[in-house]
Amino acid sequence: MAKKFDYGQGIYYFNIRNGGHNSITIKRKDKNDAVNRFLSYKSLGKDCEWLGRWEGKKFADTGMPSAKSA
């Protein structure tokens, strides 16, 4: 299933997979907020995928966040 929205430039994104082909895309403007939320979902046992910061044509800052980077 294709995404039904446009990514915003300079905004951080991550996906939460719900099994099968279903996933929810979460966005945050602030990196610390995005990392903290991502780690919160991971601590709950959710299957999460960090996408990074959208730069218009591709994602940047795609390294998997850790508690140290929050």
Image (tube, rainbow, N blue to C red):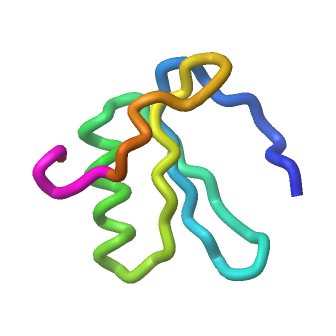
- State whether residue 26 is above or below residue 21: above
Q: Which residues are magenta?
A: 65-69
Left or right, residue 57 beside residue 61: right
Which sits in the foreground, 58 or 44? 58
Q: Quadrant of the N terminus?
A: bottom right
Residue furthest to the left in view is 68
Left or right, residue 68 beside residue 23: left
Could you tell me what secondary structure mostly forms the magenta stretch? helix
Left or right, residue 23 beside residue 5: left
Q: Total label count?
A: 0
Q: Indicate yes or no whether the magenta region holds residue 19.
A: no
Residue 7 at what x, y percent from top left?
66, 29
Residue at image coords 61%, 52%: 25
Residue 67 at what x, y percent from top left?
16, 57
Left or right, residue 32 beside residue 23: left
Residue at image coords 83%, 42%: 4
